[in-house]
Amino acid sequence: MGGISAVLIAVLAWWLVRTYNRLVRLRNQTQASWAQIDVQLKRRHELIPNLVEGARGYAAHERATLEAVVAARGVATGGGLGIVDQAAAEDALTASLGRLLALGENYPQLKADRHFATLQEELTTAEDRIAYARQFYNSAVQSYHTALESFPGNLLAGLGGAHGRKEYFEAGAVVQDAVQVRFA
């Protein structure tokens, strides 16, 4: 009887440890995937001053647009923002960048500038990487939440107090609006 009890206790202990370690792994994956978003956002933030300077030479009288991009970048790089606030700051930056890139359509000499075109292409690549990183992060959060809410994870989630829900990185209304394309 003692042997059966010892085996059951060992199996139960193994099950608890395995389940808890899975929650830790998924929590760490969400943190690592958030770090990847942060890396891509920093890359994007580094491109913006060069893009603004390139546009400034051709469209200096579009001062409000250029200042809006600089201000939005300042908020987005300010630090100390939670996931929801960071997403809102990035949405505002995306909207102002859209207006900046639209200047290229209004100023053919700017659009033809090789440096501006290269920066625009790099920014497009950065946006694609950010979109992928956001998707990966949200997928990691979904897996983590599923493990937290499913049996047996829900039993162990409270142990240690380190397993709480994570925020999704959601696109705001600005990003969700359809882009209007017009050919002249």
Image (cartoon, rainbow, N blue to C red):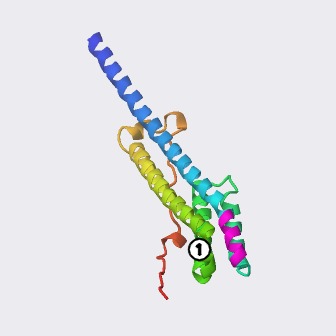
Q: Main secondary structure of the magenta part?
A: helix
Q: Is residue 115 left or right of residue 121?
A: right
Does residue 146 sit above or below 181 in this rendering?
A: above
Q: Residues within 10 Å of mark 1 (few under 14, many from 20)?
A: some
Quarter-of-image position of residue 22:
top left
Is residue 99 visible from the viewing direction of this image? no
Q: Which residue corresponds to the image point at 42% horizontal and 51% vertical from the top-left?
A: 139
In the displayed structure, 148 sits above or below 82; it is above
Whether residue 109 is situated above or below residue 116 in the rendered picture: below
Q: Position of residue 19 (x, y in %)?
A: 39, 33
Q: Which range is magenta? A: 50-58
Give whichever of 116, 183 is nearer the camera: 116
Q: Position of residue 123 (x, y in %)?
A: 56, 63
Q: Name the residue located 53 percent from the left edge and 44 percent from the top edge.
A: 31
> Looking at the image, can residue 167 be seen?
yes
- Please name whichever residue, 108 or 82, is drawn nearer the observer in this view of the structure: 108
Residue 111 sits inside the magenta stretch: no
Q: Which residue corresponds to the image point at 72% horizontal and 74% vertical from the top-left?
A: 57
Q: Where on the picture, by quarter, is residue 10?
A: top left
Q: Nearer the viewer, residue 149 or 78?
A: 78
- Tag 1 residue: 101
Could you tell me which secondary element the residue under label 1 belongs to? helix
Q: Position of residue 49 (x, y in %)?
A: 69, 63
Outermost residue toward the top in this view? 2
Residue occupying image coordinates x 58% and y 73%: 98
Q: Position of residue 134 (x, y in %)?
A: 49, 56
Mark 1 residue type: Leu
* Apparent side of residue 155 relative to residue 164 in the rendered image (left or right): left
